[in-house]
Amino acid sequence: MQPNQSNERNEPLRLTERGRLRELTVTNESKVTSLLLVLFVASCASLQAPRSAVEVPAKLKPGANESLAMIVPAKGVQIYECRARKDQSGGYEWVFVAPEAGLFDARGNTIGRHYAGPHWESTDGSKVVGTVKERADAPAANAIPWLLLVAKPVGAEGSFSKITSIQRVNTAGGVAPEAGCSQAAVGTSVRVAYTADYNFFTPSRRAWRRWQHPVALNARVVASAGRSADDR
């Protein structure tokens, strides 16, 4: 009878151990689930498009089919050269030559450079060249204007190759000197420090899907041609 009594005493212990194991398993599963949820939320947040807190004039806004993809801080210089004025005999002026700046991410890491062209080049080799479309005076005093530029890819495929428009905003400094350019100084250059934010825009998702499906586009063109033929 003693062995049976021993088994009866041990049985509750085994049940208790099993219960603790279940609790530990459930607790661990809950922790893993919570961790996965946090990672999922973080990944979703990283996929959300950036939002600029800057209010820009209407004429500096890109097309409705473009969306903000990156906000890229820049720090560098605007280069000017002293030259004879074309519209005034015997006059001289500082003429803009080119920018020279580093491009950074939100953490301050270098992601590219900005230089003559004007070009914006990523460290991955992709780059675009811009053409000024619109400009507006900067809100800050002694700051170069805000700009809207049309961008065209001219480099390898990469992080900058899908950019279609660029805004230059939040400018500080970079303005040409008011004095110092004379006949004796012709040909000399000055480098004026500046900072700015460059907002990079790419085709919106809807526009990008249309762009990625030329077959559908061709089908619409063919159908449209057919209707035009019927109209004739």
Image (cartoon, rainbow, N blue to C red):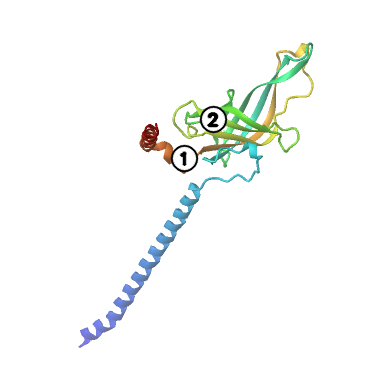
Q: List x then y, in percent, for residue 32.
A: 40, 60
Relative height, residue 185 to residue 153 (above, below): above
Which residue of the protein is positioned furthest toward the bottom in this rendering? 1
- Labelled disc at residue 151: 2
Q: CA distance from mark 1 to mark 2?
A: 17 Å
Locate residue 183: give its quadrant: top right
Q: CB atoms at circles 1 and 2 under 8 Å apart?
A: no
Locate residue 227: give its quadrant: top left
Task: Give SS at disc 2.
Answer: strand
In the rendered image, the quadrant that contains the N terminus is bottom left
Amino acid carrying label 1: it is: Ala
* Callout in the foreground (1, 2): 1
Q: List x then y, in percent, for residue 39.
A: 45, 54
Q: List x then y, in percent, for residue 110.
A: 55, 34
Please report the residue visible at 46 percent of the width from the left and 43 percent of the height from the top.
206
- Residue matched to label 1: 207
Please report the residue visible at 37 percent of the width from the left and 38 percent of the height from the top.
216
Relative height, residue 64 to residue 31 (above, below): above
Out of 68 and 178, give the one closest to the viewer. 68
In the rendered image, the quadrant that contains the C terminus is top left
Amino acid carrying label 2: it is: Ala
- Labelled disc at residue 78: none
Q: List x then y, in percent, for residue 111.
A: 53, 34
Out of 45 and 201, give the one closest to the viewer. 201
